[in-house]
């Protein structure tokens, strides 16, 4: 198993390569990948080596080849079926933003407990009532669930998603989820990231002031 942190960096490299490929770039060296992603170049080489052999020492990487290699190794080429639960302010913004043709997932439905939202659509995605979720998930083999409900409702929604066969959850509610071992749940917490950012910033500023 590739370490999670390496998967994160490989996804960053993949995004960079996508942009370079579109711009017509043919060759890139690990040093430049490092400069453009902020990942040390030795780490770039190490992470790429987890996926098997590619590129020749001293000749750099062929951009398209490396892009395709990462794509197939990390199975980013597989389009996963996803649903979003909680079509409020954040849920609506996500439905309108991420439903891009290039993404490796596609929303096939959204669910909300508010009857006023039932039958409407957001970002081109149909909103169903929460009661319809269980049979829908089973029927359509949905793999991914995105949770954008208030935190009090997040665990129950996660449990329902899992019962319906979902094995990957992206949770935006600021609460940790309890899930079984075969389910991957990742939390995205804007406030937590802000806390981390400002804390690091304070330390860096303090250090700089001491040096003066
Ligand atoms: P909101 O109140 O605008 O929307 C919540 C929606 O969820 C509503 O449409 C509501 O009807 C629906 N809902 C409530 N319970 C439900 C249930 N059991 N099943 C299905 N739908 C249900 O809230 P918001 O501002 O969009 O925030 C949504 C969540 O995202 C909150 O938990 C909030 O804390 C979190 N949030 C996270 C970030 C981040 O960076 N991760 C940023 C903003 C908000």
Image: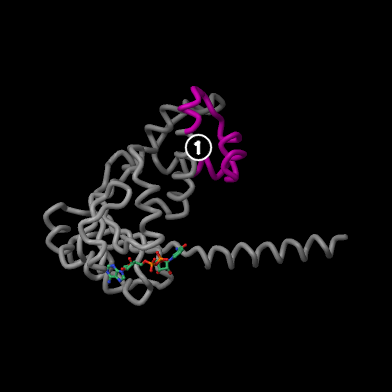
* Residue 63 screen position, x and y as percent: 47, 28
Q: Horizontally, is 210 left or right of 169 in the view?
A: right
Query: Is 90 one of the magenta-colored residues?
Result: no
From the viewer's side, name the closer residue of 12 and 202. 202
Quarter occupied by residue 100: top left
* Residue 54 screen position, x and y as percent: 43, 31
Name the residue: 26% across, 68% down: 114
Give the residues in magenta.
19-46
Say which residue label 1 marks: 16
* Residue 38 screen position, x and y as percent: 60, 45
Name the residue: 57% across, 64% down: 194
Q: Main secondary structure of the magenta part?
A: helix
Residue found at the very far front of the displayed protein: 116
Q: Horizontally, is 156 left or right of 188 in the view?
A: left
* Dot 1 beta carbon under 8 Å from ligand 1: no
Name the residue: 26% across, 52% down: 121
From the viewer's side, name the closer residue of 85 and 143. 85
Count of labels shown?
1
Quarter occupied by residue 18: top left
The C terminus, quarter of image: bottom right
Mark 1 crowd level (few <14, some 14–19, many ≥20, 10 Å Cα) = some
Q: Horizontally, is 65 left or right of 84 in the view?
A: right
Determine whether the residue tagged by mark 1 lies in a helix, strand or loop.
Answer: helix
Residue found at the very far bottom of the displayed protein: 152
* Residue 56 screen position, x and y as percent: 49, 27
Name the residue: 12% across, 61% down: 135
Q: Horizontally, is 15 left or right of 168 in the view?
A: right
Query: Is 41 one of the magenta-colored residues?
Result: yes
The colouring scheme, among rainbow, by chain, secondary structure or one colour, is one colour
Is residue 55 shown above or below 5? above
**Ligand 1, image quadrant it occupies:** bottom left
């Amino acid at each position: 198993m590739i370490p999670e942190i390496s998967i994160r960096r490989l996804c960053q490299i993949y995004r960079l390569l996508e942009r370079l490929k579109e711009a017509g770039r043919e060759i890139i060296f690990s040093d430049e990948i490092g400069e453009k992603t902020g990942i040390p170049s030795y780490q770039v080489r190490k992470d790429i080596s987890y996926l098997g052999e590619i590129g020749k020492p001293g000749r750099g990487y062929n951009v398209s080849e490396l892009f395709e290699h990462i794509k197939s190794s990390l199975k980013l080429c597989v389009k996963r079926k996803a649903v979003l639960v909680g079509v409020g302010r954040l849920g609506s913004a996500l439905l309108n933003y991420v439903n891009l043709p290039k993404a490796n997932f596609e929303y096939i439905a959204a669910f909300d407990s508010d009857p006023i939202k039932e039958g409407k659509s957001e970002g081109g995605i149909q909103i169903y009532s929460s009661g319809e979720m269980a049979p829908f998930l089973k029927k359509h083999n949905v793999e991914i669930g995105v949770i954008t409900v208030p935190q009090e409702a997040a665990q129950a929604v996660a449990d329902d998603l899992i019962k319906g066969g979902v094995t990957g959850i992206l949770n935006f509610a600021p609460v940790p989820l309890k899930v079984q071992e075969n389910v991957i749940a990742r939390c995205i917490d804007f406030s937590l990231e802000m806390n981390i950012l400002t804390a690091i910033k304070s330390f860096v500023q303090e250090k700089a002031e001491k040096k003066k």
